[in-house]
Image (cartoon, rainbow, N blue to C red):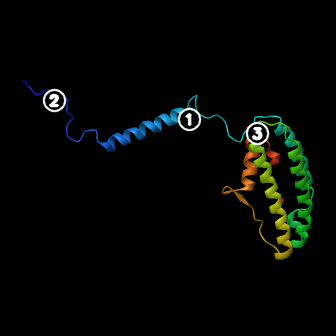
Amino acid sequence: MQNQTADTEMPDGQRWTIGRVTIALIIVSIIVFWAWALGPFGPRGNPDSLEDTTYGPTAEVHCRAALAEINALPLASTATSPADRADVLVEANAILDRLVDSLEASVEPNPSSHDKVILDKWLSDWNIYVADRYDHVDRLRTEGDVPFQVSRVESNSVTGRIDAFARVNNMDTCTVPLDL
């Protein structure tokens, strides 16, 4: 009679070691994660998408009007000095101040908690951006021809954050103006 244990043993080099079990678990975990993420139970949509789909078209009206006013101002390339350029930027900044006020006023009185959080961040980014522009005016007047400096929030530029939010919510004219 043969030894029955010999039939059930794995040949050398094919034992289930801790390392092999760990690798198998990692592979299974990756497969399960992607099945969840891409399947019906995973997250849907962009987290920056507004639930209130009426805000975007309303904001677009305000942004389009502000952009038209800014585009009517003299181009930066026509400025004869940094101080001259600063004077034009003061006008553009006043337009953006009014824009941010109108964007804030356009928010529904009782937005969903999700919309409130992301709109507050977006409007805060706009306020930071406008403050950066006012700082640039001061620097143009005191330091001469200097590059525009954009603040960073959570390791991203505020301009990138403003533009990304606007594009996700189909508000392409609500990106930062290219007048600097």
Residue at the bottom extreme, as displayed: 143
Q: Amino acid at mark 3?
A: Asp
Figure check: 173 above or below 140: above
Mark 2 or 3, nearer chain start? 2
Mark 1 or 2, nearer chain start? 2
Q: Residue at x 90, y 47 (%)?
A: 102
Figure check: 93 above or below 42: below
Residue at the left extreme, as displayed: 1
* Secondary element at image label 1: helix
| Residue 22 picture location, percent across and down | 37, 42
Which mark is on residue 5? 2
Give the camera-side residue of 144 and 22: 22
- Quarter in which the C terminus is drawn: bottom right
Figure check: 131 above or below 43: below
Q: Residue at x 80, y 43 (%)?
A: 171
> Splitting the image into 4 quarters, where does residue 62 fall?
top right
| Residue 33 picture location, percent across and down | 50, 36
| Distance Cα–Cα, label 2 vs label 3 | 65 Å
* Secondary element at image label 2: helix
Q: Residue at x 89, y 72 (%)?
A: 83
Q: Amino acid at mark 2?
A: Thr
| Distance Cα–Cα, label 1 vs label 2 | 44 Å
Nearer the viewer's eye, disc 1 or disc 2? 2
| Residue 146 picture location, percent across and down | 79, 71
Tell me, yes or no, if residue 25 can be seen here.
Answer: yes
Which mark is on residue 115? 3
Residue at the top extreme, as displayed: 1
Which mark is on residue 37? 1
* Secondary element at image label 3: helix
